[in-house]
Image (tube, rainbow, N blue to C red):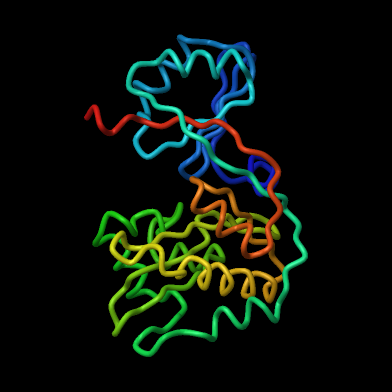
Amino acid sequence: MVLYGLKSQIGTVYRNSDRTTSFYDVGNFLYLAGELNSRFWEDFVRKYGLDYKIIISENTNWQDFLHRKVGLISFTRYSFKDKANFQVEFLNDLVTHLEEGYSIVPIDNHIYNCFSEEEWSQDLKGDFESYQDFALKGGFGFVVLKNNELIAGISSGLVYREAVEVEVATRPNEQGKGFAKKLGAAMILESLNRDMFPLWDAHNEASKKVAEFLGYELVEPYEAFELDESGI
């Protein structure tokens, strides 16, 4: 994700004065690199905050530092390879087999604006200011409608050169019914049609299982941090 973002020249890189510490802020992700610098961290948090941020570092000093920070919690995410031998016929079957009353449709202006109406669908807006911004920068995705009611969605949270970062969400009372798999299949097929690779970085075990079901190959689990909302 970092390499794709930097190559595509999106996001913002923050460095300390002697350029020994760097933070890369892209979408909902904040990557910490270089030397541990608690002053630089405190200044950044004071100025920009950490709301909705997923904080990641491969540096063990930064990881230990984040573990000690009050108000942050750690959790496990899962990274997948940026290449896969997707089975197109299998994915097509997933998309086309829907129960009566359900439909999969592309994201349009109206649907995009609906993402703001409920907490579960907020992240589907991605790192864009509006639907116009989303479409202009090559964003795309799909939703599941149940009798014309939005119950699940998948979208390009970030758009890179030749790749997109996949964001998927299902309304809590509709989870466990396979919608993420069907949407994932639709997203993969459309990405391939656009000559782009749909990058999948799983936020939890359920997302990991969906990715593996669709044909992604796991690289490794890794530790990430976020604000502890239970203490707010």
- Depth check: 208 or 61 in front? 208
- Depth check: 137 or 162 in front? 162
Q: Quadrant of the N terminus?
A: top right
From what the image shows, is residue 54 above or below residue 65? below
Q: Residue at x 62, y 12 (%)?
A: 35
Q: Residue at x 57, y 78 (%)?
A: 94
Residue 46 is left or right of residue 44, and the answer is left
From what the image shows, is residue 91 above or below residue 49? below
Could you tell me residue 79's position as x and y percent?
A: 63, 44
From what the image shows, is residue 31 above or below residue 215? above
- Depth check: 111 or 183 in front? 183
- Depth check: 144 or 132 in front? 144
Residue 215 is left or right of residue 223, and the answer is right
Q: Residue at x 28, y 63 (%)?
A: 173
From what the image shows, is residue 225 above or below residue 202? above
The residue most toward the front is: 176
Could you tell me residue 132's position as x and y percent?
A: 42, 67
Could you tell me residue 216's position as x and y percent?
A: 68, 57
Q: Residue at x 61, y 38 (%)?
A: 221
Numbered-mark total: 0
Could you tell me residue 32's position as x and y percent?
A: 56, 25
Q: Which quadrant of the figure has residue 197?
A: bottom right
Q: Quadrant of the C terminus?
A: top left
Q: Which quadrant of the figure has residue 190?
A: bottom right
Residue 174 is left or right of residue 138, and the answer is left
The residue most toward the bottom is: 100
